[in-house]
Image (spheres, rainbow, N blue to C red):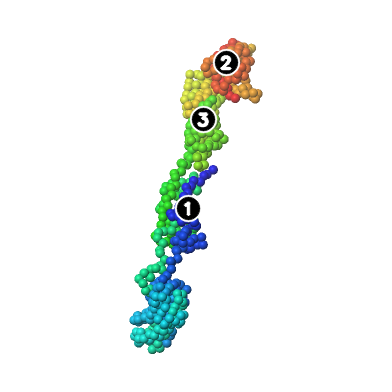
Amino acid sequence: MKLIFFVSLFLFTSVYAGAQCCGDGVCDPSEDSANCPYDCPPAAPGFNCANTIGSFNDSPTWPVNYATAQANSWCYTLSPPYPATICFEYVVPPSTEPVQVSFIHSACNTSSINQGNSPGGCNIANVTNSTISSSATYDANCNLISNNIQTGGCYNPGDIITVCLNINPATTCDPLTICPVISCGTSDCATSGTTPPVVGCPPFALSDTSLYTDLCDFNSGTAVVTPSCGSHFSYLWDDPLAQTDSVISGLNAGTYNVIVSNIAFPGCDTTISYTLPVLAALPNPVITGDFSYCEGETATLDAGGPYDTYLWSTGETTQIINPTSGTGITVTVTNENGCEATSAPVNITGPPQAILNADPEIGIAPLNVTFTNQSVGGTSYFWDFGNDSTLTIGNTSDQQQSYDSVGTYTVMLVTQANGCFDTAIVVINVISNVIDSTQPPLIVIFPNVFTPNGDNANDLFHFNSQNVKSLEVTILNRWGHTIFKSNDINFQWDGKADNGEKVTEGVYFYTYKVTGLMDEVMEGHNFVTVQY
């Protein structure tokens, strides 16, 4: 099982009580000027001057100068032919504030037409809700040569007054732009109605997480920045690729920083740091130990570690196993993060097996014998031909020997590999060429292996002999203790010691003396292998 490792942090750089403040410059229904003044600026405390002018929908911020009027399209631009009449609506301000309304023409920029509102809310003529009309006359150079404002009445705050300018037919200004401009009568009136700016940056409501999506892949690290609302942020990471998304990947262990910028409020940035820890090393099992073994022993294979789990191709689940055979043996291990790895295969080499054949095994002197080495798993071979001739060789080539004298010759082949040995023995019987017609010759064949495993096949050790008058045989174990003895010419040994228990597998030494019907004697020692 693969695990996911992560680190999570929820970050607020500033907090307002109540609803969340998104900080995207848009006043959402859940936000207000109390919990989010960045998105919902508080309303102005009230203007001393009128808060609307003309029939326009937008309210200018007082005072209104020529540039502001022109930028907000509150101006009229005219071209000949004239006459023409331009009218503006004006809302009467509170009576305590004197306000002057001016109409500035941009083409000549020489004079203006003024309508004043005296303290107390009344103008000269004290006429309520009347229309004030003005007749403007310009010369050929667009200089105002006369104006005639009709004033009157007492105006209440909020009254709408229409002021009209009549452009004389003789005016040649082309074009002629006329803009309403409002100024206050006191020095502090200009700022009394201005909304105070919000100082600082809106909060960064962000959650961030760093994790490995695969604990067995050192480059599977991921870091994520998640805004709690809006999409008004940009990102710049300090990873090798300088990624610019809210989610980056392909990271390995280390510390990474990201600069998060609020696009709606330029200059408002914050930095978040992430640390991806170093993952546990991936498993790398290497099988060590003894890959070969001798007779009666086992191989020893060690998968190393420690690891959380082991599974050998042989089925064992421990760190160390002791197989007695096998090729292509592997082990699969898992570490603490559930990461798996499988070792390279190894082969087990068993003990060498010595196999020797002789042809012929009996005959009349001089007897020429061919020995065939059919051993398995050997790397070097020692021959003792029983006639004072020995040989050490590195291959299994056939060997020839000649036996000139009557007698019994014990031939031994020792096969060696990886410090292990196995022995095979065959007995060569050389008989006289003088034949007594009244008595047959002595013949004895000595087997070199038997398998007392109860399968009724080669379960007993005995001599294959003919024309025997008497026989003595003694079998010893590796420590020289007698485990079987008999003088029966038809003896049979079942592989049990004198205490009735089966002997262990291995090679056993024995001595023998056989007398034939013509009193010829065959005496010597030999070896027999017990296998189950």
- The amino acid marked with disc number 1 is Ser
**Gap in angstroms between the C-alphas marked 3 and 1:** 58 Å
Query: If the image is split into quadrants, where does the N terminus sit?
Result: top right
Query: Could you classify mark 3 by the number of other residues whose Cα lies within 10 Å: few (under 14), some (14-19), or many (20 or more)?
Result: some
**Are the residues tagged 3 and 1 within 8 Å (C-beta)?**
no
Q: Which residue is mark 1?
A: 207
**First in sequence: mark 2 or mark 1?**
1
**Gap in angstroms between the C-alphas marked 2 and 1:** 85 Å
Q: Which residue is mark 2?
A: 483
- The amino acid marked with disc number 3 is Ala
User: Left or right: 261 with respect to 332?
Assistant: left
Query: If the image is split into quadrants, where does the C terminus sit?
Result: top right
- The amino acid marked with disc number 2 is Ile
Residue 79 visible in the current orientation: no
Residue in view at x 48 percent, y 36 percent? 305
Residue in view at x 45 percent, y 61 percent? 37
Residue in view at x 35 percent, y 81 percent? 111
Q: Which residue is mark 3?
A: 299
Give the label, 3 or 2, closer to the camera.
3
Residue 261 rendering spot, x and y as whole percentages: 42, 58
Q: Nearer the viewer, residue 329 or 8?
A: 8
SS for callout 2:
strand
Residue in view at x 45 percent, y 64 percent? 42
Extreme residue toward the top, this view: 519
Give the label, 3 or 1, closer to the camera.
1
**Gap in angstroms between the C-alphas marked 3 and 2:** 30 Å
User: Left or right: 19 with respect to 501?
Assistant: left
Q: Nearer the viewer, residue 85 or 49?
A: 49
**First in sequence: mark 3 or mark 2?**
3
